[in-house]
Amino acid sequence: MHISAKVDYAVRALVTLAAEGGGPLSGSSLAESQKISPKFLEGILAELRRARLVTSRRGADGGYRLARPAGAITIAEVMRAIDGPLAEVRGQRPEAIAYDATAQPLQIVWIAVRASLRQVLDETTLADVAGGELPAAVRRLAGEPGAWVAR
């Protein structure tokens, strides 16, 4: 699975907001805290605003705020807002792909990949990451032998 820089930056910015009680924080302070280009982050924050994950307000009391409590925003929601569906095959959802002959079981593999991504990403919230208390399933998967070994 490829996690784009945009998704990484979006999640990091939102986790920073979560750690600060939901905001408000300026775009520049979010960028500075995570060492992200302010201009690039502003574009990402605009996408998150359109997806209704953050709100923004100008002025002395302004900045970005989480649109909902951090415990109600999952990592999967952020990823979908920035990059679209979690798992696609040639731009289509796995259940829409039909294979012939010996390749037929491959559809089940792709659906299982999506299900495993959901198991982690739909169950992990911004509050989980900001508080350092990841779900048990995530900790268990990360603790499996070989999880940290590049292949």
Image: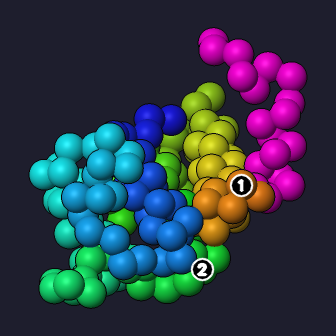
Which mark is drawn over residue 132?
Answer: 1
Tag in front: 1 or 2: 1
Magenta: main secondary structure equals: loop
Q: Within 10 Å of the Cα at label 1, are there few (<14), some (14-19), or many (20+) other Cα atoms?
A: few
Q: Is residue 141 left or right of residue 20?
A: right
Q: Residue at x 43, y 40 (%)?
A: 3
Q: Amino acid at mark 1?
A: Gly
In the image, residue 133 above or below residue 6: below
Q: Earlier in the sequence, mark 1 or mark 2?
A: 2
In the foreground, 70 or 22? 22
Q: Locate residue 97, reporting x and y percent.
A: 46, 50
Q: Which residues are magenta?
A: 134-151
Q: Within 10 Å of the Cα at label 2, are there few (<14), some (14-19), or many (20+) other Cα atoms?
A: few
In the image, residue 119 above or below residue 5: below
Which mark is drawn over residue 83?
Answer: none
In the foreground, 24 or 83? 24
Q: Locate residue 144, reporting x and y percent.
A: 86, 30
**Residue 74 is inside the magenta segment:** no
Quarter of the image that includes the C terminus? top right
Q: Residue at x 36, y 66 (%)?
A: 81
Q: Secondary structure at mark 2?
A: helix
Q: CA distance from mark 1 to mark 2?
A: 16 Å
In the foreground, 144 or 32? 32
Q: Colour scheme used in the picture?
A: rainbow
Q: Secondary structure at mark 1?
A: loop
Reading the image, the residue beneath label 2 is 72
Q: Amino acid at mark 2?
A: Ala
Q: Residue at x 80, y 40 (%)?
A: 141
